[in-house]
Structure formats: structure tokens, C-alpha cells
Image (cartoon, rainbow, N blue to C red):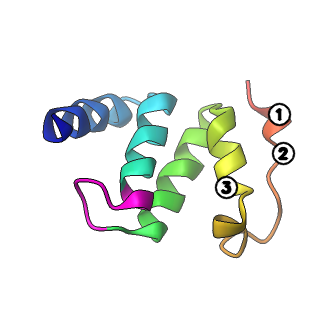
């Protein structure tokens, strides 16, 4: 169920898991189980990218989020 998934991802994200950060960002971007919040999604995608998640770099470079970032991010530098 969504609540259990969200809580599991939230716990893993608090430990710096880049995939969980990415998935929680998706929840916020789409408004699934939480109120839609693009600012929160951006913050979580940024944290996920910081921890090396290439999908998060790609999301941050999407048209939806480019206006929040002054420079395009280089997702090739993610480990």
C-alpha cells in the first residue's frame, strides 16, 4: 500500500539512500499520497542527485525544474 511504501522510502531516505530520495521526490512531484509540492520534489531530487542518482540529475534537467536551477546539472558526473 502507498502509505507503507512512502514510510519505508522516507526511512531509507533519512539514511541517505539515493533511490529512496528519488522515489519520495516522485511522490511530491505527482501528488501521490502527499500534496503536490514541486519545491519539495526539487529539494529531494537535488539530494538524490548529490548522492549519485543519475535519474535525479535527469529530472533536475527537465523543463519542469530547469527554471529552479540557474545551471544545467551534469548527470554524467554522478557515480
Task: Indicate yes or no whether the magenta region holds residue 45.
Answer: no
Q: Which residues are magenta?
A: 28-35
Secondary element type, mark 2? loop
Label pair 2/1, CB-CB below 8 angstroms: yes
Seen at 58% across and 51% down, the residue is: 46
Q: Nearer the viewer, mark 3 or mark 1?
A: 3
Q: CA separation, marks 3 and 1? A: 14 Å
- x and y percentages locating residue 74 in the rendered image: 84, 45
Q: CA separation, marks 2 and 3? A: 10 Å
Location of residue 24 with respect to 76 vertically, above or below? below
Label pair 3/1, CB-CB below 8 angstroms: no
Label 1 Cα crowd, 10 Å radius (few <14 / some 14-19 / many 20+) = few
Earlier in the chain: of badge 2 and badge 3, it is: 3
Q: CA separation, marks 2 and 1? A: 6 Å
Secondary element type, mark 1? helix
Residue occupied by mark 2 = 74
Residue occupied by mark 1 = 77
- x and y percentages locating residue 57 in the rendered image: 70, 45
Query: Residue 35 versus residue 1: which sits nearer the camera?
Result: 1
Location of residue 9 with respect to 31 vertically, above or below? above
Secondary element type, mark 3? helix
Dot label at residue 60 = 3
Seen at 15% across and 41% down, the residue is: 3
Amino acid at each position: 500500500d502507498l502509505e507503507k511504501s512512502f514510510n519505508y522510502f522516507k526511512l531509507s531516505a533519512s539514511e541517505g539512500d539515493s533511490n529512496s530520495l528519488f522515489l519520495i521526490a516522485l511522490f511530491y512531484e505527482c501528488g501521490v499520497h502527499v500534496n503536490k509540492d514541486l519545491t519539495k520534489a526539487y529539494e529531494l531530487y537535488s539530494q538524490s542527485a548529490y548522492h549519485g542518482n543519475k535519474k535525479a540529475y535527469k529530472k533536475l534537467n527537465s523543463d519542469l525544474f530547469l527554471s529552479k536551477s540557474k545551471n544545467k546539472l551534469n548527470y554524467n558526473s554522478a557515480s
